[in-house]
Image: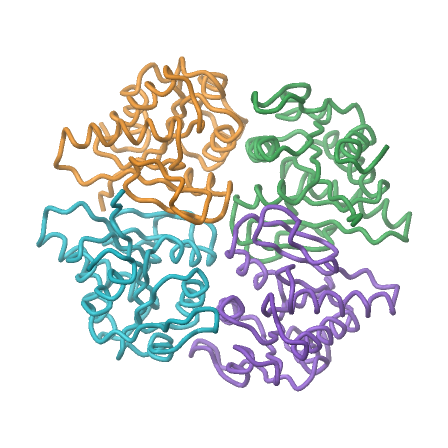
Chain colours: A orange, B cyan, C purple, D green
Amino acid sequence: MNKIPVIGVIGANFADTEVLEIASAVGEAIADSGCHLVCGGKGGVMAAACRGFRFARNELNAVRVVAIGILPEDTSASANEFVDVVVPSGVGIARNAIITRMADGIVSVGGASGTLSELAFAWQMGKPIAAMVGSGGWSEKLAGCRIDDTRTDEVYAAQSAGDAVGFLLRRTGQSE
Amino acid sequence: MNKIPVIGVIGANFADTEVLEIASAVGEAIADSGCHLVCGGKGGVMAAACRGFRFARNELNAVRVVAIGILPEDTSASANEFVDVVVPSGVGIARNAIITRMADGIVSVGGASGTLSELAFAWQMGKPIAAMVGSGGWSEKLAGCRIDDTRTDEVYAAQSAGDAVGFLLRRTGQSE
Amino acid sequence: MNKIPVIGVIGANFADTEVLEIASAVGEAIADSGCHLVCGGKGGVMAAACRGFRFARNELNAVRVVAIGILPEDTSASANEFVDVVVPSGVGIARNAIITRMADGIVSVGGASGTLSELAFAWQMGKPIAAMVGSGGWSEKLAGCRIDDTRTDEVYAAQSAGDAVGFLLRRTGQSE
Amino acid sequence: MNKIPVIGVIGANFADTEVLEIASAVGEAIADSGCHLVCGGKGGVMAAACRGFRFARNELNAVRVVAIGILPEDTSASANEFVDVVVPSGVGIARNAIITRMADGIVSVGGASGTLSELAFAWQMGKPIAAMVGSGGWSEKLAGCRIDDTRTDEVYAAQSAGDAVGFLLRRTGQSE
């Protein structure tokens, strides 16, 4: 079975313009590569990534890929407008574990404590992680590092959105 | 915002041919009406509904709607092959609450205790429910009944797949 | 290891005086038998059961057993005052699955749709269930019945609180 | 209402003898201070903390405080023998969020990626955190630091078990 890969984007609900531009480029790169996007469904980095994803998908206008937003709340009201499929999980912040479970690989953009919990989960679940160099926050701090000794690889220090998605596709065996 | 509605299909992991045919027709009706489908992602009624959904969507071949499967497990391995977007929730049977949260309305086909928990959740969450007449199990038992006194409506006794989906779209304000 | 058994009490957040008296007697019987009590932690049947439990435990004043309340919310504010250990799960209504997982056996008192979801989960998880005869609601409806064909036993129709707890202890191998 | 405070202990499932001794001392300090203990219920730091807690409680032999273990699994089998109340949550690694929700304050001992997710959640939830100096891992790395800019306080660098618990009781308003 050749399932469409799912790339997760993690990052804060509020962010600077520069960080949002990085997130948007990540969303575009995910659509360009023909993958689904999953994120926490809210604002900031999540909304920017979904927006970039939608823009690039509309350009391509053929591929059936979707942006999925897994919300903490039990209604869809807080989802950003660029999410195609809203999952109002109702499990609160524990939804961070569902996002990382669902993703075949993770792109991390900036990020505060919420993003850190997702980086930790993704690492523990053995998922490949690409952290955007220049995006600040925990992504910047952990780029090029190992989160603990249970894995021999590192959080990949991605120089661009295309670099991040390319790395994840190679690591999940979807490319080359 | 005119979000695409999400219709949930609930029913057992194993079922008779007759029940599976009903489930498949429900999946077709959901795609025909331009809605997303959400279910538990596994076999039996869930797989049949996703199969019917995919068949009808391919016929239409234009609409961007997807079949989402929310699994109890933390990997995608147990998803049926007709699910487009797998959510390996990792929260076990508690995923039943996520399915009903996510759906704007529910079609119930046959069903044992797992389906009963979803019927109970959907009722408690105020979701409109259509139970397929002739599908047996808890759907048959509760069709035309109120599950408790907190609502004034009933579980709708649906005579056909089209009847079920039409009822849900009227109730969620997506039609007429 | 001889762990202390955990008995779950399920029932509605609002109930008639008569039903609350049944719930209180169930709580007393659980403490008398030296078991922990787990419930949803809120009002109505849950509060009455915790109150009866505390009263009986204070009479005995030696045993280290506790009443655990697993709340849907992510704070403790909605817990009734007779809960010893509050678990503010933050997972919403999905906490119903945690209550039934945690219990070695379930006593059901009256109940609406929320209780029905717990009865369905308890059945699916293979837990012994005692439903209080005369308590109305879904407990009354399902007493003496099988919820589906996956089990050969029935929901036990309990004539008294002591009958219910005695049945569960026999079924979980804690007695005789 | 003067509820008994709940102190969470977080740390890895495997740890060096030195780290286990720190964890055991933390468990003792929690019992000595008359608080409940909550943890992930498994081995390593969690088991050592529960063992220290039980030892100190038996010395005191009057107080009704308990050690609660919130497991990822849906059965109790993996709980360490010193847990009094096992909650087999069945929600997998998402149980980390329940542990931090339940605790009024957190003591962090050593720790790998799992512990890091709990530190991140505790910070995001606004819980006071004491990290044991000399215990290595993420506790050591984050002691004296702020996890992000949303709070003005720091992860407290605790010099001893008593120092950690004393800090948390002051911060939760249970002391002085």
Is A32 positioned to the left or the right of A18 in the image? left
Is A6 positioned to the left or the right of A109 in the image? left
Q: Position of residue D147 (x, y in %)?
A: 59, 23
Closest to the observer: A48 or A135? A48
Question: Compared with residue C5, is residue D137 higher up or lower down, i.e. above or below?
Answer: above
Question: Compared with residue C11, is residue B173 higher up or lower down, i.e. above or below?
Answer: above
Question: Given the current orientation, which residue lies at the most extreme front position?
Answer: B176
Residue sitting at x 61%, y 61%: C40
Q: Position of residue B44 (x, y in %)?
A: 29, 66
| Quarter placement of the C terminus of chain B | bottom left
Is B69 positioned to the left or the right of A154 in the image? left
Residue sitting at x 29%, y 62%: B171
Quarter of the image for residue C174 reads bottom right
Q: Position of residue A18 (x, y in %)?
A: 37, 15
| Quarter placement of the N terminus of chain B | top left
Quarter of the image for residue A168 reads top left
Residue sitting at x 64%, y 21%: D152
Closest to the observer: C98 or A21? A21
Question: Compared with residue A168, is residue C145 higher up or lower down, i.e. above or below?
Answer: below
Question: Compared with residue D28, is residue C5 higher up or lower down, i.e. above or below?
Answer: below
Q: Position of residue B20 (x, y in %)?
A: 24, 70
